[in-house]
Amino acid sequence: MIGTIRKHSSWLWWLVAGLTIISFIYWGASPATRNGSGRSAGYGMIYGQKITADDYAAAQREFLLFYWQRNGAFPEKNPNFTRTDLERETYVRLMLAAKARELGIHVSDDAQVAAADEFLRSLTRDGQAVPMNNFMERILQPEGLDATDFQRFIVNLVTEQQLVQVLGLSGGLVPPQEAAQLYDRDHQEVSAQAVFFSASNYLSQVTASKEAVSQFYTNYMAHYRLPDRVQVNYVEYDLTNFLTAVLQKFGETNLDAQVDAYYAQKGAAAVPDAKTPEEAKATIRETMLRQAAAKMALDQAGQFVRALFAMDPVSRDNLVTLAKTDGLAVQTTAPFTEEDGPAEFAAPEELTKIAFKLNDDSPFSKPIAAAEAVYVIGLANLLPSSVPSFSEIHAQVVRDYQNHEAAVKARTAGTNFYYSATVQMAVGKTFAQAALAAGQTPFALKPFSLSSKDVPEADGHADIREIKNVAFFTTQPGHISEFEPTADGGFVLYVHSLLPVDEALKNSELPQFVSQLRRNREIEAFNQWVESEANRELRNTPVYAELMGNRSSSPSP
């Protein structure tokens, strides 16, 4: 696909090819050895074909991107995602690839290019493609992934879409009458009114006595527990500090010649956003300079690290001592968590991971490349999980107590209103009249359906899913709901009536609705196939024994 992208989409090739080389300089070892489990007994078989170590490692890297695409983070960020989960999902990727080969599924060059472009555009809100160099530096490289892994991921992403069409075909058979009924269910709107009870309206009624706040802190002490944190000392090699030296090394004339040669080879399409050849060449020149600056920064950081690791005895203070000797500035981060990373600079995920692995026996890192600098970090302080004292967080505890008590008052008021409104409406009063009699403000909600994206009047008071659940599943038209508690306080809903479906709109939207319905049914059928197929084929892989062992060792329900 890389060759295809080069042919069909020069801008993407420029970004991929231009940064692949430097990625190996930055990150060293090939990712092929990063994720493999190193099974000495082999990797088993799927569809009668032996799985090689290279096949397994490639599929595992592909799954990492597959997981990231759907969850916005890699599996290691999920404490509930185990090594066995990773292995199982890796074998599923291998199974899908094998089935695609068996069925003769081939992804065309144009489909690959379109999928890569669509994927990079899906990462932004404005529909503009994320530059590939940013995607590699911030997402791929910290995980030891590269352009080849992205290529494989894109190809298999399109392959899976074709597998869904082939293997989920039965799910796409939706009778027109059923489709029409489902459309009505999702699009029939409800007319309703609501009274919202927000904690903020009851804050003025809360008295935060010293004794009550202290007791609240004691009761909710676990809520205030801080996670493990770490502080690091760091030396920063800013890329901009190397640009002058890089330019001198290149030589102005030589650099211009290289830029001209590259532009002559690739043409204006190498930088499609450029309006003129001069602007395109300026972008190419800047990229070449920054790549060379990154290499130079990494070299200097490497020299510093070699000297640092040679110091005896090993001590946390060695980084500070050596930096002062070399005339380098040392800075210290504020304590940070593994989830958030340091606030002082844009740290790649790898830096945060390494920081939490530092200890007194191994207190320093290798050079760590980021988008704007190369860093060497050293352990400054380990801060284990702890609960701050009451005096340290007194102001926060007071605020939390006030919000908690205000929410309790809001829910009490809401419950009382439900009972009073029920009595008032039983003797002929309307919901709005019952609300006003109780000193509450009734809101007429804009008609909404199960497919509605929002209910504007409920914004800030209740989640739309809570509103929909009460309106469509727990309250009959012409009736009042019980008080529904929410994070903000709660609400009482009066469902006036179900409105007739707009037939003209239905006729215009039904074809697209049926198409999406069939697509969803195809995916459901495909997922059922995957589950059935995996239950059979994974029996021939090492992960099956682990899954069965874990199941047999689990307590009976």
Image: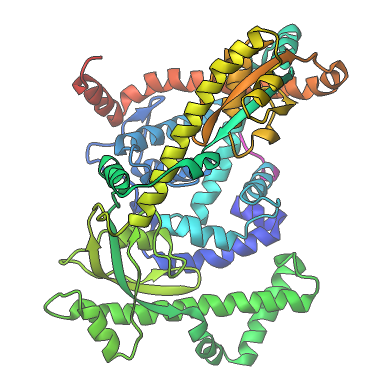
Q: Report which quarter residue 472 is drawn in.
A: top right
Residue at 42% from the left image edge and 45% from the top image edge: 402
* 324 sits left or right of 371 in the view: left
In the rendered structure, does residue 95 fall within the stretch colored magenta?
no
The C terminus sits in image quarter: top left
- Of residues 333 and 247, the one nearer the viewer is 333
Left or right: residue 349 versus residue 72 is left
Q: Nearer the viewer, residue 177 or 391?
A: 391
Q: Position of residue 185 (x, y in %)?
A: 69, 14
Which residue corresponds to the image point at 63% horizontal and 27% vertical from the top-left?
Answer: 195
Query: From what the image shows, is residue 349 above or below residue 71?
Result: below
Q: Count the marks: how many?
A: 0
Task: Examine the rendered structure and indicate whether residue 403 appears above or below residue 165.
Answer: below
Return the x and y of residue 44 as percentages of the image width and height.
31, 31
Q: Is residue 164 toward the left or the right of residue 64 in the image?
A: right
The part of the chain drawn in magenta is 106-110
**Among the 4 quarters of the image, the one containing residue 374:** bottom left
Q: Residue at x 44, y 17 (%)?
A: 532
Asked if residue 159 is positioned above or below residue 126 in the image, the reply reads above
Front residue of 4 and 270: 270
